[in-house]
Every structure is written in structure tokens, then in C-alpha cells.
Image (spheres, rainbow, N blue to C red):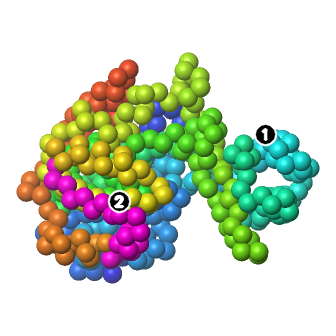
Amino acid sequence: MTGNTIIKLNPHPDIELGMEREEIEAFFTLPDTGINSDTGVIMVINELGELADSDYQQNELRPYLADKLNCIAVGVNYFGVYRNSQIQLRPSFLHNINRIYNMNLTLESFTGVQSAVDLYRIIAEAVISKGITSLDIRCQPHLITGKDEYQSWGFLPAIDCLQVLGEVLQRYKLNTRKILAFGKRYGAYIALLMGKYAPHTFSAIIDREAYSRVELKHVVSGEIMEPDYLFSFDLNNDMKFYIASACNNPWTIENESSPQYFSDSHRMIRSLLCEKHRVHSESCYHIFHSEDNGVASIYDKDRCVEILQQYNTVFYNRMAAGDKEASQTDIELFDRMLTNHGGNMQKNSADTDFSRGSNYMFDCGAKSYEFRFDSGGNIQVRCI
């Protein structure tokens, strides 16, 4: 393999909450044969909590895609990717678990804990004698996103990835008829948002079990009675123990006067179900979604596909519950998709939103979001 290139870019400002941001870290994997006139680019969007420089992304998936597609395969450690890197036991957690289960846990009970598993096992051992196999939703440890970041839920990550794409197009002379994006679950959601914000850029977007809209439990989990994250592990007696956890995000849906209020406008700019935000384009969508994926709603995806089909070419593989195809690896998925579609993942036009200097205004009710692209590979977003 030609090798991996690591770059760092100054990030786009956080236009919603004004948080200070660190540099964006991105990784380029070049095809073995090097770059030629047919070489394109594929944005390989890792899942939430999975780093772009993980062994799987850097040494398996991206090299395979780079060589298979003759593309520069790009991974990005986007804003918020360091999910759940720290655990915080708030006083409310100790108060609730002691009150509800008649125990006497203190912070000292967790002295010497080295990992999440250690911490959760202490909690499990404290309640398992009572025949309890899952904790009340009010007994939630808080999981903290690393690097002092929070969950923008798709918005800033999509901008980060588009910014990196603009840099790639400036650094290399590429076949801009072949620009792809691929992801699973949250990574696929980011890829779909990239297609929404830059509709004339991608030749193909491959979605594997993506969300179609914001789920509030991932944004304001401390204010609603749903877990953001469900941790489970097997105990020695073959019993599986479940603990729901919440994240420490700054958003609120309770205080409408707060500058951190997560309004309908914030939800709309992140929604793939808003038809008025769509324009006709050459981007082709390959969507794989299982009825029982356990992550993202199949009914939302059905509606998302109905909207996309009015503006784009869409291949929708809606898998029934228990379908073995849902368990195929990413590489198996690509091999099958390329076989079924003749390996042609290009569009007719070489234009991108960068070369076109596109300007989009997304009407989101009380607010509008303006996206500006320029031929220098830059993207500027503002909220009006």
C-alpha cells in the first residue's frame, strides 16, 4: 500500500453553542497503485466512539476500499467522536441507587476502578443478590465525551468531514466524478447529512443502518427518561446485566430561554425527513437497513427513502428481521453492491459544490442555516 497520510485542520467554528474547538484530525489511505486520472475519493465515516485511526479502519477497511475502488480513502476523527471516554458518578446517581435499592454505596466504593467494566461490575455485584438484572433508568452513570466536546449529533461532524473533503480535493488532482461516502449507523447518518448539505458533490452515498433524524436521548439524555447508551456484560452465573447511561451534553429541551435550548430549528437542520431541504442531483444512494437493527427506526428510513426517490436514484435494500445479509461484513457488502451495480460508482458531471461555488439556505423555521462552498475547498456555515 502506498501509505497513510495524517493531516490536521483548523476546525469550522461551533456556530450553535460557540464551544472552543481543537484541530480536526484526518487520515488518508492511498491505493496501492498510486494516484492516476481515474482515482476518486471515498469518505469512510467511522461510528460514534470508533476512531478513524483504529486498527480496523486504518489497516483493514480503508486499504480495501482504496484498492477496490481506486480511491483515496479518508477517515476523520470528527467532533464528538471520543464518546464515553470518561465515566462520572454524580451525587444523583448515588442518591437514587441507594434510595431505590436500599444500599449504601459511596464514591469510596469505587476506589481503584480502572475501566468501565470494573465500575459496572461493582454496581452489578451490589444489586445482583436482590435478583436485579437491570437498573432503574434513574440510576444512570454519566458518560463524558473526551476532549471537552459534546454531541452535536451529526451537524458539526458532517461539516468536519466536508471540510476535510475540500482539503483532499485541493491537495490531489482527482476524478471528481467519483466521490463517495460510506458509513454505518451514526457514521452513515453523517454521510447522509453530507449529501444533504452538499447535494452536487457525491456520486454515491452508501448508508448502512443510519439514523434519519435526531433522537433526543442522545442529545439531552439527562432530561428525559431514556438511556443514551446501554452497557451490558455477562456475569459468572450466565446472567446478563444491563446498565443505562446518560451523557453530559450541554443541550436542554426544558429551558426555552437558554442559549443551549435544542429547538425545532436545531432538529430540522439535522433531519433527513425534511423534503423542502432536498434538490435534484446526480448523487446515487445505496441504502441497507434491517427491520430489527436495534439502532435506527426502519419506519423513519422508509420515509427517508420515499423523499430521496423524488430527487435522486436510490437502491433500497430493506432487510426482513433475521435476514442473514444484515450480518455481512462491510467488505462483503461492498463486494455484493459492486457486483450488483457493475462497479460503476461515478456520476456524469465532474462538478462538486466546491467547484460550483454553491450556496444553500436551509429554512428551519425560526432559524435558517446557510452553507457556502468555494473553489478553494472551503465551507462556511452560518445560522441566521
Q: Which residue is under mark 2?
A: 289
Q: Amino acid at mark 2?
A: His
Q: Position of residue 205 (x, y in %)?
A: 26, 57
Q: For residue 85, what is the image quadrant?
A: bottom right
Q: Residue at x 46, y 36 (%)?
A: 14
Label 2 with label 1: CB-CB less than 8 Å: no
Asked if residue 116 can be seen in this view, the reply is no
Q: Which residues are magenta?
A: 312-332
| Name of the residue lying farthest toward the right | 104
**Quadrant occupied by the C terminus:** top left
Secondary structure under tag 2 reads strand
Q: Position of residue 61 (x, y in %)?
A: 38, 73
Residue nearer the viewer, 215 or 318? 318
- Whole-percent x and y of residue 372? 26, 36
Up/down of 105 relative to 133, above or below:
above
Q: Amino acid at mark 1?
A: Ser
**Crowding at mark 1 (Cα within 10 Å: few <14, some 14-19, many 20+):** few
**Residue sitting at 57 percent across and 30 percent down?**
252
Closer to us: 298 or 106: 298
At mark 1, the secondary structure is: helix
Q: Residue at x 37, y 70 (%)?
A: 323
Q: Position of residue 78 (x, y in %)?
A: 45, 52
Considering only order in the chain, which callout, 1 or 2, is on the residue closer to the N terminus?
1
Q: Which residue is mark 1?
A: 92
Residue under the point 88% across and 56% down: 109
* Structural distance between the alpha carbons of marks 2 and 1: 38 Å
